Amino acid sequence: MSDIITTDAVIIGAGPCGLFAVFELGLLDIKCHVIDILDRPGGQCAELYPEKPIYDIPALPVVTGAELTSRLMEQIKPFNPTFHFNHMVTAVRKLGDAGFELETDGGLRFHARVVVIAAGGGSFQPKKPPIPGIDAYEGTSVFYSVKRMEALRGKDVLIVGGGDSALDWTLNLQPIARSLTLLHRRDDFRAAPDSVRKMRELVADGKMDFRLGQVTALRGDNGVLSAAVVKGNDGQNFEIACNAMLPFFGLTMKLGPVAEWGLNLHENLIPVDTEKFETSVEGIFAIGDINTYPGKLKLILSGFHEAALMAQKVFKLKNPGERLMFQYTTSSSSLQKKLGVS
C-alpha cells in the first residue's frame, strides 16, 4: 500500500460530469483528486464515441466527445486537479466526522472529506456476439467502438447491429470506407428513423450494402479478417468480404464495487435528493448517469447542473458555520482571479 493521499474531494469518474465537478468545486477552493478506470479523461465520450457529434451541449451546436473532453480539461486547468487513471476504487470507508478512506485496485489510498461518484452507469463492457474464435480478431480486425475514424479509411467494413450506434457509424464511415455492409437479423431497426432513411438511400444509390442474417463464423489469418460467414434468414450461408468488423450489440453496464459501499440503491442506480445530490450517506454525492431521482434525464447538461448544486453542499461540509456568498464568474473579481482572467 502507498502512503495516504489527503485531499478535500475524491471524484470517481473522469467523464464530462466528473470534469465539470472539478470546475465547480475549484471555484469554492475545494481541491480534488480524480480517479478513473480508463487510461484517459472523457469517460464514455472518449471510450465510445470520441469522433461522434453531440448536438445538445449549450452554446455548442455540434461538438465531438473528444473535443468536449478537451474543452473541459482546458476549463479546469486553473484548479490543477490530480488524475489517477487505470485505477478502480474498490473500497470506501467512513472515518467518523473526518470524511472517508478510499482504496483502489492499484494500491492507492485516499483520505477525503467528501466523495463524488460521477461514474456514469458504472464500468461498461461491449456485449460480444457469440461467434467462435472472435477473440483472435479483437483489436486488429474486430472493434467494439471507433477510437479513430481514419484507421478505417479504405477498409472493407462490416457493421453488425440495428441500433443507433450501428446506424450512426454506418453513415459516418460510408464516405471513407472502400466498401461498407450493414448486417442485421431483421429489416427493422431500433435507431432514429432519419438515420434509417439515410441508410436506405445509400443502399438504393449503390453506395453500400444491407444484408439480413447473423454472423456464424469468421475467416482470416493472424488476426486479420478476410470474410464473415453469415447465415441468412432463408437458412442459407453466404460470405461477406471484409477486413474490419464492428459488432454493435449494446453494452453491459456493471455497477462494480459501488454496490458494496453501503449506499441505498435502486435498480443499480443511486438515489439522491435534488437539493444537493447527496446519497443516503452524508458526504457521498452522486452526479450524472449513475444517480436517479424523479424526473431524471440522462443528459450531460443535467449532470453539469447537478455538479453545481453538489458543490454548494460540499463547501458547507468542508467549512461548517462559514457563510457561502454566491458569486457570478462574470462579475466576481475573486472568481476571475482564480480562473486567471482578471
Image (cartoon, helix red, strand yellow):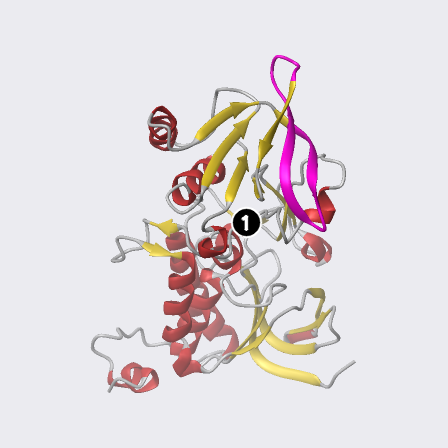
Residue furthest to the top in view is 234
Q: Residues within 10 Å of mark 1 (few under 14, many from 20)?
A: some
Q: Residue at horizontal 37%, vertical 76%?
A: 324
Element on which disc 1 rests: loop
- In the rendered view of the protein, which quadrant contains the C terminus? bottom left
Quarter placement of the N terminus = bottom right
Q: How many dots with numbers?
A: 1
Residue nearest the observer in this picture, 277 or 201: 201
Quarter of the image holding residue 100? bottom right
Residue 257 lies, in percent from the top left, at 71, 57
- Picture coordinates of residue 96, whole percent (x, y): 69, 74
* Position above or below: 219 against 87: above
Q: Residue 234: where, in percent of width, then height?
A: 61, 12
The answer to which of 62 and 223 lies nearer the viewer is 223
Q: Tell me where residue 73 sits by quadrant.
A: bottom left
Q: Tell me: 219 left or right of 169.
A: right
Q: Is residue 28 visible?
A: no
Q: Is residue 177 above or below residue 321?
A: above
Indicate whether residue 230 is drawn in magenta: yes
The residue positioned 65% from the left and 16% from the top of the image is 236
Residue in the image at 33% along x and 56% along y: 63
Nearest to the observer: residue 53 or residue 151: 151
Q: Main secondary structure of the magenta part?
A: strand
Whether residue 120 is situated above or below residue 228 in the rendered picture: below
Q: What residue appears at the point 46 percent right and 72 percent down from the top-left corner?
A: 22
* Left-right relation of 228 to 3: left
| In the image, residue 220 above or below residue 306 | above
Q: Amino acid at mark 1?
A: Ser
Q: Is residue 88 magenta?
A: no
The residue range painted magenta reads 215-236
Q: On the image, numbered disc 1 is attached to which residue?
A: 145
Is 255 placed left or right of 83 in the picture? Answer: right
